[in-house]
Image (cartoon, rainbow, N blue to C red):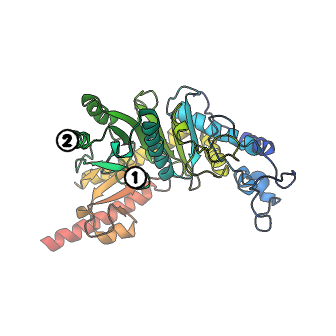
Amino acid sequence: MLHWKKLDQKERKERIQRALEENVNFSKDISLGYPASKLDGKVFYDDAPFLKEAPTLQTYVANPNHIGCHTLGTSEKAFKGTQQIEREVLDVIAVDIFKAVPNSYDGYISPGGTEANIQAIWMYRNYFMNQKGAQLHEIAIVASEDTHYSIAKGSNVLMLDWIKVPVSFHQREIDANALEQLLIDAKNKGKKYFITVSNMGTTMFGSVDDPEVYCALYEKHHLEYKLHIDGAYGGFVYPFSNPLSTLNFSNPKISSITIDAHKMLQSPYGTGIFICRKGLIENVLTKEAEYVEGMDLTLCGSRSGSNAVAVWMILFAYGPHGWFEKVSVLQMRTQFLCNELDQLNIPYFREPFMNIVTLEAKNIDHALAERFDLVPQQHNSDNQWYKIVLMDHVEVEHLTTFIAQLKATMHVEKGITA
C-alpha cells in the first residue's frame, strides 16, 4: 500500500489538529469576506472539554467548506488543511484500493452515492457533447434493471434516455442477447453515445456485473461509450474479498467509480466518493462560479470538510490489514447463513464475494420478515425477494435466532398442508 497505513489514536488526533490549524479559525482570525463560519457558538460550544479528544467533532464545529475539487488546480485557501485530508482519503481509495496510478485521477467526497452517480452521468454527457459534438438525443444511459434508482434520477435530471437491461431472475446476470437487441434498436433510433453504469454490488442483491458484457457488444457494433462502476455498496467489500478483481483502474475501459463511505465504512451519512480518470471532470466546470477560488467541478458546490475527516479517521484507524480482517469476518458470517439456508433447502441469491443474501419472498413468512426487518424488493403485494445484509452489527447469534424462527414457520406450514 502506497498511502494507507494504520495509525494509533494519538497519531490520528495530532494529524487532524494540524490540519485544522492550517484552516482559517473563525473564532480568532479576522476573516471578513467568507460567506462561511464555524457552527453557531450559542449551540455548538467549541471549548467543550470532550472536543479535545474528538478530532472529528472538532472538525464539525469548525465547519470547513470543501467546495470544489481538490485534486485539480487551486482551492479555497481558507480550508487548505482539511482539503489535504480529503486528498489523503482519495489517494487511499483511488490508488491503494482501486489501483489508479498516482496523480492520474480526479475526485471528491460527495454528499452521497446518488450525487456521485449523477456526477458521472453529467460528466460523460458533457464529454460527449463537448468533445464529440453529440446532440442530447444521441446520448443514452445503459444500466441493468437491478441498478440503483439514482440512475433513474440522473436520467430524469439530465434528460437522457435510460436503456434498462434485463437480468436473469435467479443469477441476476445481464442478459447479453437482450442487451444486444436493445443496442441495435437504440442505434437504429439515432443513439450514438452510451454512458454505461456497471454494478459492483447492487442494492437489493449485492450482484456484480461483468462490464465486459457491455464492452464486447459496444465494440462489436462500433459504438462509442464510457464505463462507470457503481460500487456505492460494494466498493469497501469486493476489492478485499476478491483480490483478483479487475473492477478498478487497472482496467483501461473503466473511467470512473463511485463508492459510499456511509455504508460499509460506517461513516456519517452524506459521504459518497467520486473518482474519475484525469481529463474528464473539466467537462462539468461551472464557469459562472467566479467568486470561488479554483474551479467548481462538483454537482453539490459547498460541502462539509468534516465528512472527509470522518472517512480519514476510519481508514487510518483500521489500516489495510485491519479492514481486510473486518471484511473477512463478515464473509464468514454470510457463509454461515448460506450454509444454514442450504440445510433447509431454501433457495437464495448470493454473490460469492459479497455480504448480502437475498431470499425469494414466497419462502419467507411475512410476519417473520417484519420481525427481523428484512428489506423487501418492493413494498407491495408483488414483492419477490427479501434481503439480509450482513453488516457489522449482525452477529451469528442474530442469525441463529432468525434460522430457528424460520424453521418454526416451516414446520407450521407443513403441519397445515398435511
Asked if 287 appears above or below 37 in the picture, the reply is above
* Between discs 2 and 1, the one toward the N terminus: 1
Q: Residue at x 81, y 61 (%)?
A: 48
- Residue situated in front as seen by the camera: 236 or 11: 236
CA gap, disc 2 and disc 1:
23 Å
Residue 10 in sight in this render:
no
Quarter that holds the N terminus? top right
The front one of 402 and 262 is: 262
Residue 237: image location, x then y, percent:
46, 42
The answer to whether 364 appears left or right of 73 in the picture is: left
Question: Which residue sits at x=77%, y=42%?
Answer: 14
- 119 on left or right of 319: left
Left or right: where 307 falls relative to 369 = right
Tell me: residue 283, above or below residue 271: above
Question: Which amino acid, by three-letter code, is at mark 1?
Answer: Met
The picture places residue 338, in percent across and down from the top left corner, at 32, 50
**Quadrant of the rendered image containing residue 234:** top left
| Residue receiving disc 2 | 181
The quadrant of the rendering that contains the C terminus is bottom left
